[in-house]
Each structure stands twice: as structure tokens, then as C-alpha cells.
Amino acid sequence: SLGELLAAMRSPAAAVREAAWAACYERYHQVVWTRALYVMRTVAWLAEPREAAADVASDVFVGLPDAVQHYREEGRAEWWLKQVVVRTALRRREA
């Protein structure tokens, strides 16, 4: 599950963290990109929202090892990840 992957990303063992990150990327990249596209499509002046969504997805996964340190195992992990995506997309939209 995503919650288990996020917990594994906080492991003291680098190999465990890297494997969990890779599995998270493989399983959830499409979910992250789709949520980012949903936000980026609201930017009227943006010529190519799909490219912007790809950039946001990249930002999310690059920042995920740091963000996971703030993850609390309460509620659904998928909701937490989607909130990370929305916040990242909104920051990019404002920039």
C-alpha cells in the first residue's frame, strides 16, 4: 500500500528508501500527473498544461523524500499524496 511505501521511505537503510521511492513512482506517477493536470488546466494563460503537469509531477517525486518526513499515518495515504500534488501545483502556478 502507499502508506507502507511512505513509511519505508523513512527507513534508515538507503536501499529500502530507494526501493520504496521507485515503487511509489511506478505505481503512483499517473495519479500524481493526473491530479497536477487538473490543477494546471485552471491556468488560463498556460499554453501547455500537460507539460506543466509533468513538471509538477517531477517536482513532487523529487521532493517526496523530504515531504514524507511530515507524513502522519492518519487517514488515507492517497489523500495525503494528492494534497502534496495540489500544493506543489499551486506553488508552481503562482510562480
Image (cartoon, rainbow, N blue to C red):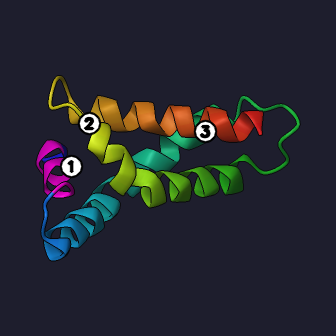
Chief SS of the magenta region = helix
Residue depicted at 44% across the width and 37% down the height: 84
Would residue 66 appear left or right of 59 to someone viewing this image? left
- Read off the residue under disc 2: 71
Binning the other alpha carbons within 10 Å of mark 2 as few (below 14), some (14 to 19) or many (20 upward) gives some
Kindly report the distance in space between the C-alpha atoms of the residues bearing marks 2 and 3. 19 Å
The image quadrant that residue 38 belongs to is top right
| Numbered disc 3: secondary structure | helix
Q: Position of residue 81 (x, y in %)?
A: 35, 38
* Proximity of marks 1 and 2: CB atoms separated by less than 8 Å: yes
* Proximity of marks 3 and 1: CB atoms separated by less than 8 Å: no
Residue furthest out toward the front: 12
Kindly report the distance in space between the C-alpha atoms of the residues bearing marks 3 and 1. 20 Å
| Numbered disc 1: secondary structure | helix
Magenta segment, which residues? Answer: 3-10
Residue depicted at 18% across the width and 23% down the height: 75
- Read off the residue under disc 1: 6
- Read off the residue under disc 3: 89
Amino acid type assigned to the residue bearing label 1 in the image: Leu
* Viewer-closest of 13 and 74: 13
